[in-house]
Amino acid sequence: MDSSLLLIPGLAADHAMWRSQLAALSDYRPQVTDVATRHPSIPAMAAALLDEHPGELVLCGASMGGMIAMEAARQAPERIRGLALLGTNANPETEEMRVLRENAIALFEQGRVAEIIEPNVGLAFHPDNAQALAAEYLRFVLAAGAGQLIRQNRAVISRPDARLHLARLTCPVLVMCGEDDQLAPPGHSRQIAALCSNAKLVMVPRCGHMLTMEQPEFVNATLREWLSALP
């Protein structure tokens, strides 16, 4: 594969969530982009990614990273050789979620990050995986800090409606979701797969939202099979 493989983290995440994939896909020379930490909106993040990585791209985005990947494909469809979308959502923000995020932002602005994040760690994982992975997840989310949490939540609130352009994509699209994802439930992934003309939908068993950490062997094998079949 001659294209650059870019891994795009989710909200408040970093390269740690891709640790297993960086090792398992090393022959594809994957890179983790940090555009989400430096720009205020999903379109600006996608534009920076395209600017910083010229040529053809294979984008693998998880959660908010999937939103960035879909927006990059809207901005430059001719440059996207493949999209892997993990546990993400093509819809614009709902009013209910906007209110929840705005309330959280108000507390982040008061420096009350741990007070919000720690009680909700369980929502990110399947119950079987939470105990083993919660500490690592908390480490990188708390390390992101209030400023990044505020900026990225605002970016997600104002994200574009990706449904409007997905049907025009012609590149292969891999859509993966944990069967027990509470933060981006499987219906969102089924919707994305139905909208894309060249999509493969894979549900990950015994898995919540953090599928790259929860079921790394399954995710890695699925990604390798998909990458090897790219035209």
Image: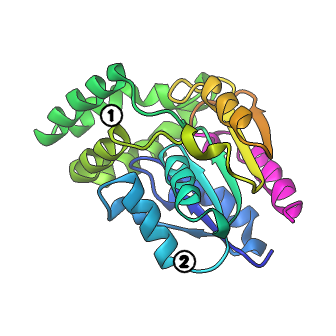
Of 23 and 107, the residue lying toward us: 107
199 relative position to 192: left or right: right
Is 216 magenta? The answer is: yes
Q: Circle 1 — which element? A: helix
Residue 40: mark: none
Residue at coordinates 23% horizontally, 31% vertically from top-left? 102
Q: Which residue is mark 2?
A: 53
Q: Which residue is mark 1?
A: 117
Count of all numbered marks drawn on residues in the image = 2
Q: Position of residue 7 (x, y in %)?
A: 59, 61
Q: Which residues are magenta?
A: 210-231
Residue density around tag 2, few if under 14, some if 14–19, many if 20 or more, within 10 Å: few
Residue 199 in which image quadrant:
top right
Residue at coordinates 33% horizontally, 48% vertically from top-left? 152
Q: Circle 2 — which element? A: loop
Of 127 and 48, the residue lying toward us: 48
